[in-house]
Amino acid sequence: MISGFWDQLRDEAIAAGKKEPLLANFLAASVLDHESFESCLSFILSKKICNDLLPIRTIRDLFIDAFSSSPKIIENAAYDIRASYERDPAIETYLSVILYLKGYQAIQVHRLAHFLWQKRRQEIALFIQSRNAEVFSIDIHPGCEMGYGIMFDHATGIVIGETCVIENNVSILQQVTLGGTGNDQGDRHPKIRSGVLISAGAKVLGNIEIGEGAKIGAGSVVLNDVHAHTTVVGVPARVAGKPETLSPAETMQQNFLEDKPEISR
């Protein structure tokens, strides 16, 4: 996948430079001067989160080491680009995702922080988390586990706790919190299964499970498990029906009124 994907990304950068010559230098430095997707992504992300005390070269070396040690990170990054491209009707190219979508960029920075956290390099992992939050206004604890095909749409204000697990092909919108309910230690954050859509402003709290293909309505507060392929909405959240598709994360349909009504037994 990576080879064809990288070729398309370069072709899009060339086309964009011809269409808007003012961006030619930017596109060259960000994409066209690089020999691989790994090099390109590490440059873009390092440029975003470096500062005077930890320069771009140092941050970039961390990314390159992570990509080399765990190739799945770069594979997941490619799947994440495709997820945003396929689910966001405003996105017309892969190039737009990697260059301009802060939700995508924040996910990839988190993948580095999580890699470092697993290597017991907690201090640098927390530094990367801090820079992620400062630059993108998205706060993800380095301990959070993420699968592939993750999309953060708009993304501002997303908060995700340490023991949260997010499986594959999940979509999360702005101002969502995946948090705890107090100051308990141990496993205390939500488990988000594959295909889930968490709509804007929802709060999912505690060590609860959001089942595969579930949908959480905008502004909802979820305090209990949600069964697979179930729509919940409200404060506190209650069952409102079933999503029309098996994977609402892919359709991004937030309007729960269009879901199948719950059948009383």
Image (cartoon, helix red, strand yellow):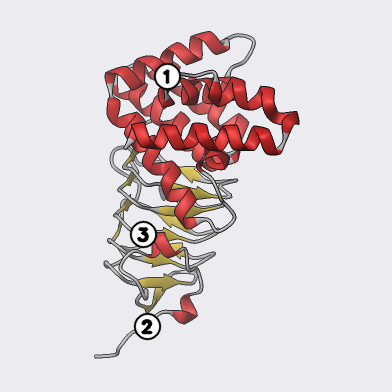
Between 77 and 14, the one nearer to me in the picture = 14
Q: Position of residue 80 (x, y in %)?
A: 41, 43
Residue under pointer 1? 63
Give the residue at mark 2.
Answer: 260
Q: Amino acid at mark 3?
A: Val
Disc 3 to disc 2, C-alpha distance: 16 Å
Alpha-carbon neighbours of circle 3 within 10 Å: few (<14), some, or many (≥20)? Answer: many
Residue 203: give x, y in percent of width and height. 48, 57
Which secondary structure, mark 2?
Answer: loop
Residue matched to label 3: 196
Q: Is residue 217 above or below residue 111?
A: below
Identify the amino acid type marked 1: Phe
> Which quadrant of the view contains residue 147?
top left
- Residue 35 at x, y = what percent? 44, 19
Q: Is any atom of residue 18 visible in this view? A: yes
Say which label, 1 or 3, has the lower sequence index: 1
Foreground of the two, 141 or 108: 108
Q: Examine the rendered structure and indicate whether residue 261 appears above or below residue 197.
A: below
The residue drawn where x is 35% and y is 43% is 164
Q: Residues within 10 Å of mark 1 (few under 14, many from 20)?
A: many
**Residue type marked 2:** Lys
Upstream in sequence: badge 3 or badge 2: 3
- Residue drawn 43% across the image and 26% down it: 37
